[in-house]
Amino acid sequence: MTETIIAAIIGAAISLITTMLTLSVTASIEKIKVQAERQQRKEDAKREKLTDIYTELVSIINSYPKESPNNALETIEYPPHYSMESFDSIVDILNYQIDDYKRLLENKSISTEAKNHNKTQIWEREYVIEQVLKIKEDYCNARDAYKTFCKTKKMVLDLYAGQAVKNNIVEFEVLIHNVFISGHTLKDVYDPRYNKIEVIRREIIDSMRNDIGLY
């Protein structure tokens, strides 16, 4: 009789423990599920907020020129130095230089070698002027678009964007300032693997894709 009672008690205890463990595991699973759903809703809301903003920002960033006017200017002899968005001043100086070379060509005693040299200098400057004006157009359009973006969308970006995205955007802003305001010349400008503007563009896009879960 005693053995039967003990067995019943043990059975009941085992059943109780099993029930408690089952409830605990179920509660843990439910908690994990709730947390996962909450995290998913959070990520979905973030993606909804940022996808269009990121798309617009990438379009603006990609519209910036990938070279400095100084990269174009370094291809000629005695070039002026660009800085502080001085596109028009640079074009004026190049035109003055072209006029000087044209006056030299008017000299009837000029040698054939000197004549060819001066004609080359004129052609090179005319070509550089075209490059500088194209860089100016692309830069000014991108700069104005970015200013508008910052006025209208920057708050949402600051609230929802991941830290890696923010860091890369700051790095891009510094680089653009260095190139188009301070007048730094980019190295390896025609190699997308090393051109700093091309590199930071890719890093921004990669961090954005990672931030909204596209990887």
Image (spheres, helix red, strand yellow):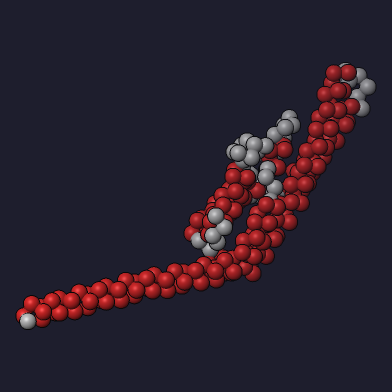
Q: Quadrant of the C terminus?
A: bottom right
**Residue 17 in the figure: left or right of residue 37:** left
Front-most of residues 63 and 84: 63
Q: Is residue 150 visible?
A: no
Front-most of residues 95 and 177: 177
**Residue 145 in the figure: left or right of residue 3:** right
Answer above or below: position of 100 versus 147. above
Question: Residue 151 in the image: x percent, y percent?
Answer: 63, 68
Q: Residue at x 20, y 74 (%)?
A: 14
Front-most of residues 135 and 98: 135
Question: Residue 17 in the image: x percent, y percent?
Answer: 22, 75
Q: Is residue 111 visible?
A: yes
Residue furthest left as drawn: 2
Front-most of residues 191 and 20: 20
Question: Residue 184 in the image: x percent, y percent?
Answer: 61, 42
Question: Residue 168 in the image: x percent, y percent?
Answer: 54, 53
Q: Residue at x 86, y 23 (%)?
A: 116
Q: Quadrant of the N terminus?
A: bottom left
**Residue 118 in the figure: left or right of residue 187:** right
